[in-house]
Image (cartoon, grey):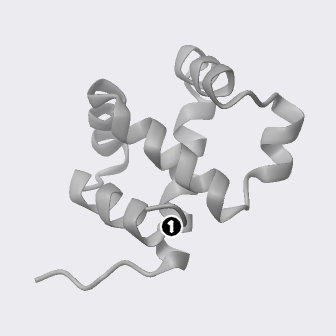
Amino acid sequence: MRSKMTPAAAETLALKGLGFLANSDAPMDRFMALSGIGPGELRERAGEPEFLAAVMDFLLSDEGLLTAFCEQTSTDPKDLQAARQALPGA
């Protein structure tokens, strides 16, 4: 049985997700449009747990993005679910 993910580990994984999005123009544009933030605010809020939860929600809502992220980073999709649960608003 896996141990519960810590908030710090969840934030680290969400930051990896944000980096993944930043390297993908169309998904990043869609994330910014849906979240209503611009590039400047994105940089300001990147360390906020609530914002990182939104990143995780976005990745988890799109199976194609989720699969691509997990393949690129060798991450188990279950880890993203665990990370989301460790962040605010779950």
Q: Residue at x 43, y 62 (%)?
A: 90
Depth order, front residue of 79/75: 79
Seen in the image, is 87 located left or right of residue 46?
Answer: left
Which residue is painted at 82% across and 31% down in the image?
39
Q: Where is residue 37 in the image (x, y as percent from the top left)?
A: 77, 31
Q: Where is residue 50 in the image (x, y as percent from the top left)?
A: 64, 58
Residue 74's place in the image compared with 66, above or below, is: below
x and y percentages locating residue 18 in the rendered image: 59, 44
Q: Which residue lies furthest to the front in this view?
A: 89
Q: Where is residue 86 in the image (x, y as percent from the top left)?
A: 44, 72
**Neighbourhood count class around disc 1 (C-alpha, 10 Å): few under 14, some 14–19, many 20 upward:** many
Q: How many labels does the image show?
A: 1
- The residue closer to the viewer here, 60 or 20, is 60
Residue where numbered disc 1 is placed? 87
Amino acid type at image mark 1: Leu
Residue ranking furthest to the left: 1
Where is the N terminus found, in terms of image quarters?
bottom left
Question: Residue shown at 58%/19% (left/top)?
Answer: 30
Q: Is mark 1 on a helix, strand or loop?
A: loop
